[in-house]
Structures are given as C-alpha cells and as structure tokens.
Amino acid sequence: MGWLAAGGTYEVALVEGRVAARLASGTTPAGQEGEQQRSLPAEIRDRPEVVELQRFAEWLDRHAAECAAQVTDWMVSSLPVPTGLLARVWPDEAWRAALRDIVIVGATPQEVGFLRDADDSGELRVVNLDGETVRLAAPTVTMPHPVLLPGLEELRAFAAESGMTQGVEQIHRATWSKPTGTHGGADRITEFADAEYRSWFHLSSRATSLGYKISGSAIVDRIRDAGRVFTATVGMSDPYTEEKAWTGSLTWSDADGHRRLPLTEVGPVAWSEGMRMAAALHAGRTVTTDGAE
C-alpha cells in the first residue's frame, strides 16, 4: 500500500499493521523528506485519511484472526477441506499466513507434507519429509490434529531443521494420549482439579481468553472427533457462595452435554483437547510471591 497525503505536511500508510506517518516531500529541507515519525503527529490523528486507515487496520486484524480460527477448526476437527477452496483463498495474505506450512494429508496416508502453495489448477504443492516438493491433486485434504499424525516427532524435527513456522499451531500443539488400561467405570479426571483463582471473574476471564465458553457452573469445549461431537467440561465453583474460585474435575459428555461418558468412550482428539483445556486452566491459577499455590 502506498503513502497517502494527510494535509500538506505529512503522508500516511499502513506499515507492519499500524498507521505510520512521514514528512511529505517538499515540506522540509532536502534529505529530510520521507523520514518516518516515531509516533503519529497529533495534528493529523483526526484526519479522515488516518481514521480510515486505522479502521482498515482493525478490519485486517479481525480478518486474520477469523482465518486462523477457521484453519484451527479444520485442524482440530480433522475435517476434509476441498483443494479448490484452498486455491481460491491462497492469494489472500491472511489466509496464506494461516495455511502455510500446515501439515496436510491427501488421498492416502503416504501423501503427507507441509503445505507451501496452492494454485488455480486444483493442485497443492507440499514439502515431504524427504525435502522434496511434490504436487497433490486430491479433491480434498485433511489437516490432522497432531494426536492423529503418525511420526509427529519426525515432523517437528524436520520443521525445525527447515526453519518452518506454522501460522496455526498444529505440530507443536500440546497433546495428551489416553493411558492404556483406563478403568471401565471411571468418568472423570482430577489431575488438574482444585486450581485456585482470586475470584470467579478471574477464572471465567481466563477461560474465555483461551477460547472456551462458560455454561452455568462449568467451562466447556465442544470437540469433533471422527464424526462424533463431544463436550469436554471443567467444573468451577459457585460465584455467589465463595470469594475465591476453584476448578473442578474434567469430564466428557455427548454433544448436548446430557450424558456423561465413561473415559473408555472418549475419542483421542476429544481426550487430548479436554486435557489441554484443563491443563491451561490449571496453569493460570493464583500463585503467591513465594511460589506456593
């Protein structure tokens, strides 16, 4: 985006996502024109050009967040995504930032690699673990949740060696695998329970900032796993009876949250995402200055 005149003295433009100003040519001694200001000069902050650029910058931020959220949803749910759709959105910088270097799988498990490009031909270009750029022409691809990715450690090592950085956290997303021999009658996890917060509002704020929802006296996350929807729930104390707040046990239920499920029925993605939620809430607990909880 080029520089726009803002009055007779300054020009403005978006630079790295924010509105920047510089001295316009012809307004200062030779050699000083074009010098970018450290902050936006007060005399042009309310000019229409500046206000519109600020609104545009805010829209770009929202758009980038929406693109990342959609790609995250595709990845967490391991949903099939049409390659034609990826080709259509690829020219958009925000979509490209969210999609670039995501691990995708084509028609077979052997068609796996880091997404590098998409074009109108309907083909995707990916880099495989041999370091070769290959084309995928499958009608749809998936962006598997990391708990479903075979050779996850190998993918992480290859990405580190190649200097790849994912715009959406996939291969470095924290994962938990269900322990073998889970007791058939167990229906809750208490490992991250009893995390203390200063108040219910601090706990609920922590939950919503992480992208989870509050439903009654619980923090919930709905997770799609192999075509089935699970509701992961972490209990929380009553805001009307306690000054402080605590997290409760982690449980899973059906999509509507009506039937609590035994741990043996919880799918691998639902298990991992539920544990991720409980661990993140536990990590935000109140800690005293001497390090004690």
Image (tube, rainbow, N blue to C red):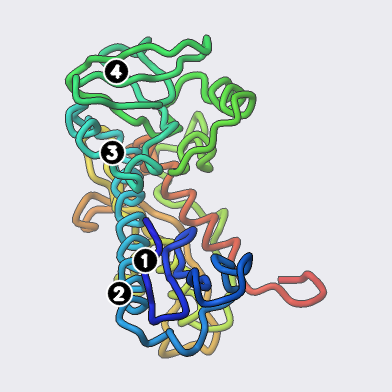
Question: Disc 1 or disc 2, which is closer to the eye?
Answer: 2
Which residue is disc 2 drawn over? 52
Amino acid beneath label 4: Gly
Question: Disc 1 or disc 4, which is closer to the eye?
Answer: 1
> Which of marks 1 and 3 precedes in the sequence?
1
> Which of marks 4 and 3 precedes in the sequence?
3
> Which of marks 2 and 1 precedes in the sequence?
2
Q: Is residue 101 above or below residue 52?
A: above
Which residue is disc 1 drawn over? 57
Amino acid beneath label 1: Ala
Comparing 241 with 203, the one in front is 203
Comparing 170 with 276, the one in front is 170
- In the structure shown, which secondary structural element does the residue marked by tag 3 occupy? loop
Question: Disc 3 or disc 4, which is closer to the eye?
Answer: 3
Q: Position of residue 116 (x, y in %)?
A: 40, 26
Which residue is disc 3 drawn over? 91
Amino acid beneath label 3: Pro
Question: Disc 2 or disc 3, which is closer to the eye?
Answer: 2
Q: Residues within 10 Å of mark 3 (few under 14, many from 20)?
A: few
Residue appearing at x 49%, y 56% in the figure? 278
Which residue is disc 4 drawn over? 106
- In the structure shown, which secondary structural element does the residue marked by tag 1 occupy? helix
Amino acid beneath label 2: Glu
> Which of marks 3 and 2 precedes in the sequence?
2
- Whether residue 21 is visible, yes or no, is no
